[in-house]
Image (cartoon, rainbow, N blue to C red):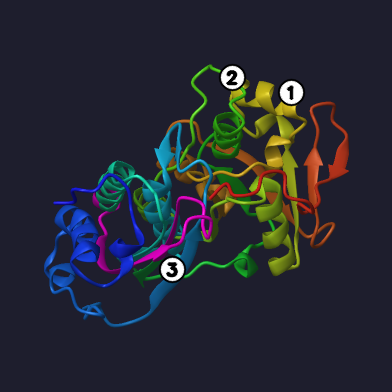
Amino acid sequence: MVKDKTVTLQHGNGGKKMHEVIEVFRSKLTNPTLDEMADAAQLEVTSGKIAFSTDSFVIKPVFFPGGDIGELAVYGTVNDISMKGAKPLFISLALIIEEGFSLSSLEKIASSVKKAARASGVKVVTGDIKVVEKGAADGIFINTSGIGVVEKGGYFTGAKARAGDTVVINGPIAEHGIAIVNAREDLGFTGDIKSDCRNLNHSVEKCLKASRNISVLRDPTRGGLATTLNEIADNSNLGIDINETDVPVRQNVRKLCDVLGFDPLYVANEGKFVCFVREKDSEKVRKAMGPGSRIIGRVTKAHKKKVHLITQLGSTRILPMLEVSQLPRIC
């Protein structure tokens, strides 16, 4: 049990106090591999290909409407693995904590990691804790790495997009980025604006069962939907047409985007993904994605490596890749 109220440099010294902090996480994430408390985890995976991903999370604020850095760190890596058509299995968890960080907040983050891992069906099997001097970090940073098994027919990349594919998205965009800026700047906008932070692996499994004609899976996080579609257009050497009226945006999110001068197409998401699929299976995949999913466009041989937005007025404009970040430290 940790008796101190805040993290000190002694909690990172490798001794008794550090093990007290480790126990905060180990007790919540217990499993035979983690409980070995070894420097490396020995894992069993089926033969074939694996997907391996790593990511770091430096979000500000650490706690935000709809989630916190603990959930975000697990879901972020789970989703990156899922976008390869792989089943996520194992996660590592490395913490860099600033001296003076509240231990009650650390307990809360550990509970969130437990909740997210359980929801995703993954095990945290190894980890690390470092404490740095006050001013050398900003509260807490988390790095997660993950391993998943690539399912038969999986391993999707943007280069696999095909002319004629339809583009389907699983729900309204821009909620994570707008929730973060609203909380960070204390703008006072209400209306239940929350991050869409969540795991996508179960939704992806349903899509893969619904169709064998999926060519691309991708989650539009930093850079938003517009940047993700540009990456896929560039990778595949094809064009993409998107219908503005079909792209779902909640009214409260759109209103705040208008006030701040943000284009929701470039605002980050943490619980959305796009699926490129043959037109004959597009409706099956849309239903598999769940309520709120929409068919928003299609892939074309015209205007290679460019994304075109067909506006509400029927005109067409090029939708370029994001050039200047609208919101730093959103994940």
Question: With respect to residue 24, does 40 lie above or below?
Answer: below
* Quadrant assignment, res 102: top left
Q: Between marks 3 and 2, how big is the CA–CA gap?
A: 42 Å
Q: Is residue 199 visible?
A: no
Considering only order in the chain, which callout, 1 or 2, is on the residue closer to the N terminus? 2
Q: Is residue 137 one of those drawn in magenta? A: yes
Q: Between marks 2 and 1, how big is the CA–CA gap?
A: 11 Å
Q: Determine whether the residue tagged by mark 1 lies in a helix, strand or loop.
A: helix
Q: Between marks 3 and 1, how big is the CA–CA gap?
A: 41 Å
Considering only order in the chain, which callout, 2 or 3, is on the residue closer to the N terminus? 3
Query: Which label number is shown at residue 189?
Result: 2
Residue type at mark 3: give it: Gly
Considering only order in the chain, which callout, 1 or 3, is on the residue closer to the N terminus? 3
In the rendered view, does 238 fall on the left or right side of 106?
Answer: right
Q: Determine whether the residue tagged by mark 3 lies in a helix, strand or loop.
A: loop
Tag 3–tag 1 contact (CB < 8 Å): no
In the rendered view, does 82 fall on the left or right side of 167?
Answer: left
In the rendered image, residue 119, in percent from the top left (x then y), is placed at 27, 47
Please name the residue shown 67% across and 61% down the image: 232
Please name the residue shown 43% across and 49% down the image: 72
Which dot, 3 or 2, sits closer to the camera? 2
* Closer-to-camera residue (155/2): 2
Residue type at mark 1: give it: Val
In the rendered image, residue 251, in percent from the top left (x then y), is placed at 61, 20
Q: Which residue is mark 1?
A: 259
Give the magenta range: 118-144
* Quadrant assignment, res 256: top right
Please name the residue shown 57% across and 54% down the image: 278
Tag 2–tag 1 contact (CB < 8 Å): yes
Mark 3 Cα shell of 10 Å, populated few (<14), some (14-19), many (≥20): many
